[in-house]
Amino acid sequence: AQTVTQSQPEMSVQEAETVTLSCTYDTSENNYYLFWYKQPPSRQMILVIRQEAYKQQNATENRFSVNFQKAAKSFSLKISDSQLGDTAMYFCAFVSLQGAQKLVFGQGTRLTINP
Amino acid sequence: DAGVTQSPTHLIKTRGQHVTLRCSPISGHKSVSWYQQVLGQGPQFIFQYYEKEERGRGNFPDRFSARQFPNYSSELNVNALLLGDSALYLCASSIQGHGPYEQYFGPGTRLTVT
């Protein structure tokens, strides 16, 4: 079974700073996808960024980028030039390409951006 | 286009009662998945339905059941409610039932069991 671990329950930074959220996962599979989801206080979960395991190049979406280390099973999210609207719970998630489209989530990191 | 919709938004039930939660996927999406999110934790997978067939089931007791209708909407049913069933229930839809297609989440139904 796959597991996803986020070791930082809470983080807080000042607006415009850069912050990195950590995530490790465990799987015996070789083909999978990894995601970072954001859940603002209004609670609707939205996708921030995704990474294909077969791609060595790290995914980037505007101010959001990942550091994907497949051998180490590590998948961190970097937010550059943080904004007040980035305040939210952030969840790292794994999905296998085998079987059901089941997202396995970590416990989440509560990120607060201070003005 | 409308996103994933869920009803009701909030629900309060008593232990032992039954509850039905509803989800309408994004138009054109054929897969619906259900997740339970207990306060302070990440969502846990309950079910996936694709083309009206159960495609996957998480580690939940038989008190939990679901179905998908011909219009791809879905219901999650929970019987004999326990206090521990109090949670946010999230529905997610996807255009396909397998592979890395993005899952779009609804706003959730907050269930409180007293």
Image (cartoon, coloured by chain):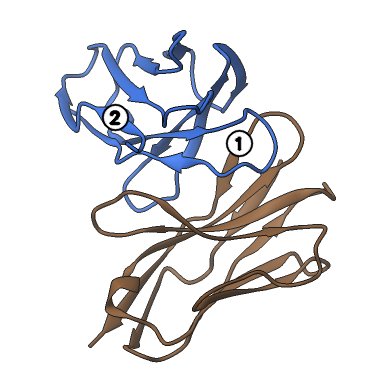
Chain colours: A brown, B blue
Point 58% across, 75% down: residue: A65
Q: Which quadrant of the view contains residue A49?
A: bottom right
- In the picture, the quarter occupied by the N terminus of chain A is top right
Q: Secondary structure at mark 2?
A: strand
Identify the amino acid type marked 2.
Gln
Q: Residue at the front extreme?
A: B1
A102 displayed left or right of B93? right
Q: Which quadrant of the view contains residue A61?
A: bottom right
How far across and down, in percent of the image, does residue A58 sit? 71, 72
How far across and down, in percent of the image, does residue B1 sit? 34, 38
Q: What's the distance in space between the residues labelled 1 and 2, CA to CA?
A: 20 Å
How far across and down, in percent of the image, does residue A27 sit? 76, 50
Q: Residue at label 2?
A: B6
Q: Secondary structure at mark 1?
A: loop
Q: Which mark is residue B108?
A: none
Q: Nearer the viewer, residue A19 or B12?
A: A19
The chain under label 1 reads A
Point 40% across, 18% down: residue: B73
Q: Nearer the viewer, residue A69 or B84?
A: A69
Q: Residue at label 1?
A: A102
